[in-house]
Image: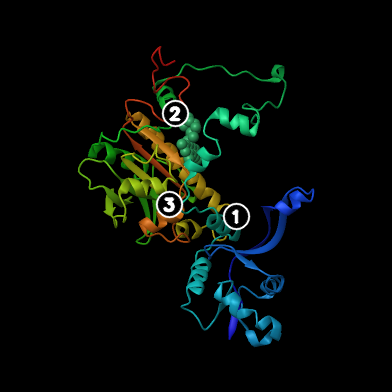
Amino acid sequence: MRVRRCAVLFLESREDVDFDLESLLTGGAGLSRHQRWLALAAHLDAPVEVDSQERELLGRLSPSEWSAAESLEAAEESLLPNLIKRGLVLAEEEPDAPHRERDEALRAGHWWPAAAMMHRLARWEGVDSVSSMESNEMTTAADLRRKLGAPPIHALERVDAGERVALPRIDGNDFDAMLARRSTCRNFDSERPLSLPLFAHMMQRVFAAQSQVKVDEYTVFLKKNTPSGGGLHPTEAYLIVQNVEGLAPGLYHYHVVDHALEPLRTPDEPLEQFARRALAGQHWFSNAPAMAVLTPRYARSFWKYRQHAKAYRALVLDSGHLSQTLYLSATELGLGAFVTSAINEVDIERGFGLDPLVEGPLAICGFGWRAQTMSTSEFDPAQEVWLRTDEES
Ligand SMILES: Cc1cc2nc3c(=O)[nH]c(=O)nc-3n(C[C@H](O)[C@H](O)[C@H](O)COP(=O)(O)O)c2cc1C
């Protein structure tokens, strides 16, 4: 049998701290600590605990060259079946084994190892961020202040006031007024559908290719209204459409050149329930009429930026730029908009049929008509969006 180590592997020495009654009763701190080694592999769904012998062997096996298992000492060879079973070592004669297939997919994807690791480890499944925020009493600014103390200063000062060069304040124009009206919407009107032209206008502004350059049939570069690292525009919009006139509620993929929707399989649960799960329980966003899951196609970026230390960062920035275009486009059309990175990636991947090594979500943004009344708080100190009456203020 010939074997090699998986492509991307990091070892973490993790400390588990548990409550320990005996320690408390004998005058100790009431805590027990124990240290263990975890193998973090980007092609696996979860960390794998390894012992010191396994750790040493993993450090010696080549991730690139196949070597004969028989060339190892007997004690090391005996560790292989368990390492192979857990996907940390791959066997050459098992090309169809699921771990082997995932490892090959990772190798083919040109990921920078640390980015592959981060991408994998940051994914959530079934997390309810709202109830954990509530149970930890971390919902309001006052809660945060009480629990965490004062935050680092809101406006950084590097020199004394007298040394600062004052800039003139400029009277704003319509664009400034529009910027001032941009505010994260947490109160959508679930009863009021978006008209098809309004929805189409948003998609055209935010996600559509505006023009293109064709090097050859398979080498095409798109121009969009938003900048993109390397000009590659790798970020796809997977849509949760809940309330748009003339469109069946469901999941879609947006075709950026044809400016068209590609219907996908409907989830096995009510759409708003799926949306709420995707949004890690954030019910204040889950009734938005239209949402886009921002999902880079990693291969499109890594085609140019192979094993590149900045490539993943550029993709995160791309999503941020897209969401800002979406916010401003919505604001200009009189709509509310939001973005969130508190999402259950694994549930979303399952819903849309995505392979996270190939295309995995980074954020969700959405838009729609605002509700008449605010039930979840928004950040609008200048009252640009919500005009308070005298009784309320
Ligand atoms: C990257 C990013 C992630 C965000 N995630 C959340 C979120 O998980 N939940 C939420 O309610 N708002 C989220 N927001 C919105 C911010 O809370 C909001 O921008 C901030 O409070 C300032 O308010 P404003 O956007 O109305 O100016 C996010 C914004 C950004 C840019």
Give the number of the disc on residue 377. 2
Give the number of the disc on residue 309. 1
Q: Is residue 14 visible?
A: yes
Question: Disc 2 on helix, strand or loop?
Answer: loop
Please state if 185 lies on the left or on the right of 310 as rendered: left
- Residue at the location (37% across, 32% down)? 187
Considering the image in quadrants, where does the C terminus appear? top left
Q: Up-down: is 4 above or below 357?
A: below
Which amino acid does the dot numbered 3 rest on? Answer: Thr
* Label 1 to label 2: alpha-carbon separation: 39 Å
Q: Up-down: is 114 above or below 85?
A: above
Residue 63, percent from left and from top: 61, 73
Mark 1 vs mark 2: which is more N-terminal? Answer: 1
- Residue at the location (59% across, 19% down)? 167
Disc 3 marks which residue?
Answer: 295
* Label 3 to label 2: alpha-carbon separation: 28 Å
Give the number of the disc on residue 393. none
